[in-house]
Amino acid sequence: MSETKTAAADLSLFPTYARYPIALVKGDGSWLWDDQGKRYLDFMSGIAVTNLGHAPKQIKAALIKQLDELWHVSNLFHIPNQVEAAKLITDNSCADAVFFCNSGAEANEAAIKLARRYNQKVLNNGRYEIITFEQSFHGRTLATLTATGQAKVKEGFAPLPEGFKTIPLNDLEALEAAVSDKTAAIMLEMVQAEGGIYPVDAAYMKGLVALCEKHGILLIADEIQTGMGRTGKLFAYEHYGIEPDIFTMAKGLGSGFPVGAMAAKEKLREGFTAGSHGSTFGGTPIATAVVKATLETIVGEGLSARAAQMGEYLIGQLRGKLAGNAFVHEVRGLGLLVGIECAEPIAGILNEAQERGLIVISAGPNVIRLLPNLLVTEEEIDTAVAILAELLEAKRPV
Ligand SMILES: *Cc1c(COP(=O)(O)O)cnc(C)c1O
């Protein structure tokens, strides 16, 4: 895409994104092509969205079949695909009931609303406060950006909704101090993804769950980026041997089709009643046909276990090839959610990688984030690692 074409096209849009000067027009598996015909190895997957690669065949077939039958009906009618998709979620998780929406932020909104409404209308205890964590990311609506533990997403949007408290992660004393008789829920990512690839400490998680049980506080897991097999389990909370009361999904849930969902345990079912929450587009026949096909593929083909195995291979190769390079502070991750923490900001490295045909993103200023699809091959991993090792070698301090 020429410079002038890019600038002219962007003038008709709000400047909400710092876009790369690349227009991607075709995708197949782990590969993308731009409008100049250049090929890229995609280790970003639309930020953990295209977990089955680009244009996956089973999902495409399910989508085309549904397009021939019915696109949309109101949620005032029964939607069989929605029930079947929800059942696949409840059969493969700790949840008993699902609400479908269209994005991650909406899924978290639903979780926040359910936590408050359950406390206020079922338990009648008047609790409303949600505790969240520094460096977290939960979305861009007013409530979810307030829940987000990053100042930059809140700038200029005051006044923000009340009832959120943000504290440091992995600090049990800070958590104990933050809990009050107003605390309705604690909400967290099992691996902070946007914030820099920080898995929650296992001992801390135990303490957090014990505190929730002691005080009757709901636990909300934001699995929007970590869910759908990404971390080597279908949902990342499984790594911790715990069961959240509520968890949220989006990103990989539709393999690239926009869809979100909030799932919760049985006791929370009565937190919502007819009319208490809703969404015009939530769980349409098309969206839930795609969710069904996505879950059938991930569960049926054992792709969570595959992600665990390929993630181990990726981390092993990175650690091996980057060993002794003082520019690299740490390689860490869970499954195929992997970060390379560097000594300095890495924005320039992302551009250099694109020039060499590799697409990766950042997680915070100094961390290169790798999110290949769950079907990535060892050969593709070797290619990506070789490009990154060469780029990072050039940054090695002399
Ligand atoms: C992406 C993301 C969201 C927001 O999802 P949207 O679909 O962009 O609204 C929320 N939480 C986490 C952990 C995410 O990664």
Image (tube, rainbow, N blue to C red):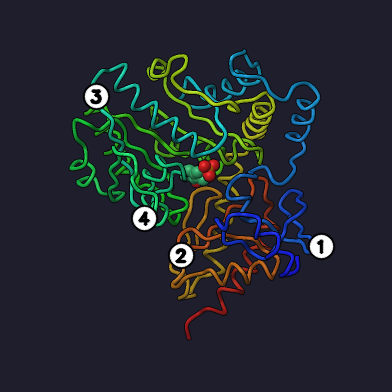
**Residue 37 bears which disc, if any?**
1
Quadrant location of the N terminus? bottom right
Mark 1 residue type: Gly
| In front of the other: 220 or 24 | 24
**Residue 126 bears which disc, if any?**
3
Mark 3 residue type: Gly
Query: Do the residues under discs 4 and 2 have CB atoms within 8 angstroms?
Result: no
The kind of secondary structure element at disc 2 is: loop
Mark 2 residue type: Pro
**Residue 388 bears which disc, if any?**
none
| Residue 19 position within the rendered picture, expressed as x and y whole percent measured from the top left | 61, 61
Which is nearer the N-term, disc 2 or disc 1? 1
For mark 4, what is the residue? Answer: 151
| In front of the other: 304 or 295 | 295
Q: Residue at x 48, y 61 (%)?
A: 331
Residue 225 shows in this picture = no
**Residue 365 bears which disc, if any?**
2
Which is nearer the N-term, disc 3 or disc 1? 1
Which is nearer the N-term, disc 2 or disc 3? 3
| Residue 338 position within the rendered picture, expressed as x and y whole percent measured from the top left | 52, 55
Q: From the viewer's perspective, is the residue at label 4 or at label 1 nearer?
A: 4
Given the current orientation, which residue lies at the most extreme bottom position?
398
Query: Do the residues under discs 2 and 3 have CB atoms within 8 angstroms?
Result: no
Which is nearer the N-term, disc 4 or disc 2? 4
| Residue 229 position within the rendered picture, expressed as x and y whole percent measured from the top left | 56, 39
The CA span between labels 3 and 4 is: 28 Å
